[in-house]
Amino acid sequence: GAVVSQHPSWVICKSGTSVKIECRSLDFQATTMFWYRQFPKQSLMLMATSNEGSKATYEQGVEKDKFLINHASLTLSTLTVTSAHPEDSSFYICSASPLAGNTGELFFGEGSRLTVL
Amino acid sequence: QQQVKQSPQSLIVQKGGISIINCAYENTAFDYFPWYQQFPGKGPALLIAIRPDVSEKKEGRFTISFNKSAKQFSLHIMDSQPGDSATYFCAASTRSGFQKLVFGTGTRLLVSP
C-alpha cells in the first residue's frame, strides 16, 4: 500500500514555543491531506483538511491561528502548533489518499507524539 | 447526526474465538464504512471497508456485516489471535464529504493466549 510518513515521530517542547510536524506521501501525490488529533485512549478527531495550494479547512472548535497548516506541494503538508501549551500535548496523525487510481482509501501516517512541558 | 457509535469499549476473547465489534450511525448519507486497526503508538491501518450496496464483505479472517435498514455494521474477527490485540475503530464518510471520516470511539481488543 501507499506510504505516509510523519516527522518527527515524537517531540518534547517547552510551553510557549512552536513545533512543526511534517506529513509526506512517499510514493504518491495527494491534493488533500487530513490532520487528526488523538488523546490517550480516545478516538481520532479531525482537526483540519489540508488542500494543496489553498487554505486549510478547519473543523469547528479548532483554532486556525494556533494550528497552522501549509500544503505547499502534492506530497507535503505541515502542521505547526504555535505557542504550544501542555493541553496541546497529544498524538497528531495525518492521512492522505492517492490521486491516481483512487479507491477512496485513506493512508495514515505513524503519528507524531507531542509533549509540551 | 455525524456520530458513529461503537461498542463494546473493550473486549477480551480467547485465542481461536470470534471477536465481534458493532457500530451504528444516524446519517443516511454515509456511504463508505471502513474499519481501522491501531497498535499503541502507531497510526491506524485500514483493515477492511464496505459500501452499502453489499451486506457482507470478507477478507481473510475479517468480515464486515452491513445492515442498511438498521444503520448498523459490524466487524467479525474469526480465529482471533494474540497478534490481533489492538484498538479497532469503525468509521464512516459521505460521498460529498469525500474521505472526511467520522470515527467511532474505538474498541480495545485483547486476545488471550
Image (cartoon, coloured by chain):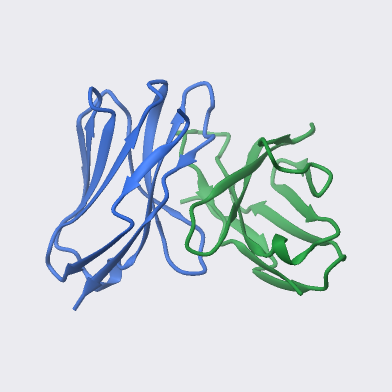
Q: Residue at x 28, y 53 (%)?
A: B8
> Closer to the camera, B51 or B60?
B51
> Closer to the camera, A94 or A24?
A94
The quadrant holding residue A80 is: bottom right
A88 above or below A28? below
Chain that is coloured green in the picture: A
Q: Residue at x 34, y 46 (%)?
A: B6
The quadrant holding residue B23 is: top left
Answer with left or right where residue A107 lies relative to residue A87: left
Give coordinates of residue A117: x percent, y percent. Answer: 76, 75
The quadrant holding residue B48 is: top left
Q: How many marks?
A: 0
Answer with left or right where residue A98 lies relative to residue B82: right
Answer with left or right where residue A49 lies relative to residue A40: right
Answer with left or right where residue B83 lies relative to residue A53: left
Q: Residue at x 28, y 28 (%)?
A: B71
Give coordinates of residue B97: x percent, y percent. Answer: 54, 26
> Closer to the camera, A103 or B5?
B5
According to the rendering, which colour does chain B have?
A: blue
Give coordinates of residue A61: x percent, y percent. Answer: 69, 40
Q: Residue at x 52, y 51 (%)?
A: A44
Farthest bottom residue in view: B113
Give coordinates of residue B49: x percent, y percent. Answer: 34, 40
